[in-house]
């Protein structure tokens, strides 16, 4: 039976999704200032962000299983933990309370992000689900933009508590909106005949999508982490690099909210993935051969525009393929992506003093995934045919 779309649930989810990224990246633009305020090293402040991908790799599958069994309860737990983590950071003006709050919020993140496919499957009609996934994913990137903007406004040591208080207020309000929005009956979902993990990992298409996710995630994380250091020898300062990265994420938000909707309607998922990876590789080569502020603005913004929409496209395929175990399947995708981000960031970090080699490695990583993206054409067509039966 066709359900009536409840967009209020998508709005609530989008706010909480943005909240997770806001808490994650609160200190990304004020690392030096925060280190001075709390009397710790810049590396210690960096761990306030690094704890998120590290715990995601560990918790992605367990949280996916929770969502497949108790979807609404698991999602609300993620929203509450995110808000609680943001509030805990306000208890004391020292690094210990910051770390405690970050750990709480990092536990919540997989419960929220893994739910992007489940929220659409339970609260939207089938025709609206690609749009819902695109909006939900774009909101995740929008949370990064909010974090960068706040760190651009609250730039001094004395203003950090105000930034944290504003972030906590946003997280609490987001959790309240979500709790109100998801009240009422859920769209019935049958439990998988096998265990959710076996059902998800046993699907060859899901395994291929997991492998594919490693590459765009890896390039994006490494670029976001080391763009400033790699462009510095070409005369690009920290402020300019921060602006470049902000524009990259803004372009990704716009692209993620619009491109996947058009791609699904035109049945061009494989073609878009091939194009995004190829364009990303070309942009990385351009950065290697002609680094500079102008090239950085153009190339890195283009990478955000074409690469980040790959995530909602992959997640929409996951929702369509494994409706009964979408939480676990989404967890596998996110886990693979975070692993890719960690591995590629380590490799590029070793080459941070050699920008030419680092950018060429990123180009090669993007190109390696092109054959895999092209090979998805037939499996995607088969999924589409099954969904129309």
Image (tube, rainbow, N blue to C red):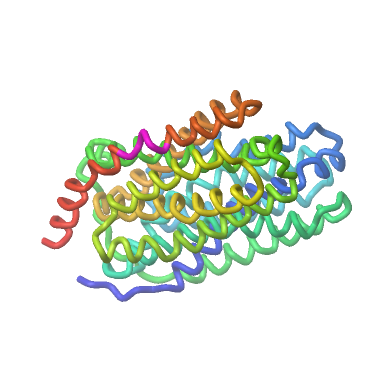
Q: Is residue 40 above or below residue 11?
A: above
Query: Could you tell me which residue is drawn at 86 percent across and 35 percent down?
Result: 39
Report the side of 262 relative to 17 (left or right): left
The part of the image, by quadrant, that contains residue 161 is bottom right
Instruction: Identify the image quadrant of the C terminus.
Output: bottom left
Q: Is residue 177 above or below residue 220?
A: below
Q: Which residues are magenta?
A: 366-370
Residue 282 percent across, percent down from the top left:
45, 43
- Taking depth in this image into account, of 97 and 366 the one nearest to the observer is 366
Q: Is residue 280 above or below residue 359?
A: below
Q: Main secondary structure of the magenta part?
A: helix
Residue 50 percent across, percent down from the top left:
62, 36
* Residue 175 makes an appearance in the image: yes
Report the side of 106 relative to 328 (left or right): right
Extreme residue in the right direction: 158
Q: Is residue 16 above or below residue 310?
A: below
Residue 174 percent across, percent down from the top left:
59, 64
Report the side of 74 relative to 356 (left or right): left
Residue 109 percent across, percent down from the top left:
53, 47
Q: Is residue 75 magenta?
A: no
The part of the image, by quadrant, that contains residue 149 is bottom right
- Taking depth in this image into account, of 268 and 99 the one nearest to the observer is 268
């Amino acid at each position: 039976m066709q359900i009536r779309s409840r967009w209020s649930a998508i709005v609530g989810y989008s706010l909480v999704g943005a909240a997770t990224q806001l808490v994650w990246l609160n200190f990304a633009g004020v690392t030096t200032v925060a280190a001075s305020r709390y009397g710790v090293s810049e590396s210690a402040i960096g761990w306030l962000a690094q704890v998120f991908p590290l715990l995601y790799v560990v918790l992605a599958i367990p949280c996916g299983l929770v969502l497949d069994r108790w979807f609404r309860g698991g999602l609300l737990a993620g929203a509450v933990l995110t808000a609680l983590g943001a509030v805990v950071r306000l208890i004391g003006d020292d690094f210990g309370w910051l770390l405690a709050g970050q750990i709480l919020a990092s536990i919540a993140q997989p419960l929220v992000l893994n739910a992007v496919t489940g929220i659409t499957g339970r609260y939207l009609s089938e025709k609206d689900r690609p749009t819902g996934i695109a909006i939900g994913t774009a909101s995740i990137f929008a949370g990064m933009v909010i974090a960068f903007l706040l760190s651009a406004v609250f730039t001094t040591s004395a203003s950090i508590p105000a930034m944290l208080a504003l972030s906590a207020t946003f997280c609490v309000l987001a959790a309240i909106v979500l709790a109100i929005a998801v009240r009422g009956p859920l769209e019935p979902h049958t439990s998988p005949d096998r265990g959710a993990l076996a059902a998800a990992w046993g699907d060859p298409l899901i395994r291929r999508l997991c492998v594919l996710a490693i590459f765009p995630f890896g390039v994006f994380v490494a670029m976001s982490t080391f763009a400033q250091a790699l462009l510095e020898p070409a005369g690009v300062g920290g402020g300019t690099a921060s602006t470049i990265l902000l524009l990259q994420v803004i372009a990704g938000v716009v692209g993620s909210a619009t491109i996947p909707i058009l791609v699904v309607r035109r049945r061009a998922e494989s073609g878009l993935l091939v194009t995004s990876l190829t364009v990303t590789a070309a942009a990385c080569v351009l950065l290697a051969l002609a680094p500079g502020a102008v090239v950085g603005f153009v190339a890195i913004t283009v990478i955000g525009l074409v690469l980040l929409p790959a995530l909602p496209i992959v997640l929409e395929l996951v929702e369509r393929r494994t409706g009964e175990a979408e939480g676990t399947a989404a967890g596998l995708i996110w886990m693979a992506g975070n692993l890719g981000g960690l591995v590629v960031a380590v490799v590029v970090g070793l080459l941070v003093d050699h920008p030419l080699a680092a950018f060429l490695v990123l180009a090669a990583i993007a190109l390696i995934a092109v054959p895999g993206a092209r090979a998805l054409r037939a499996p995607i067509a088969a999924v589409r045919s099954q969904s129309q039966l």
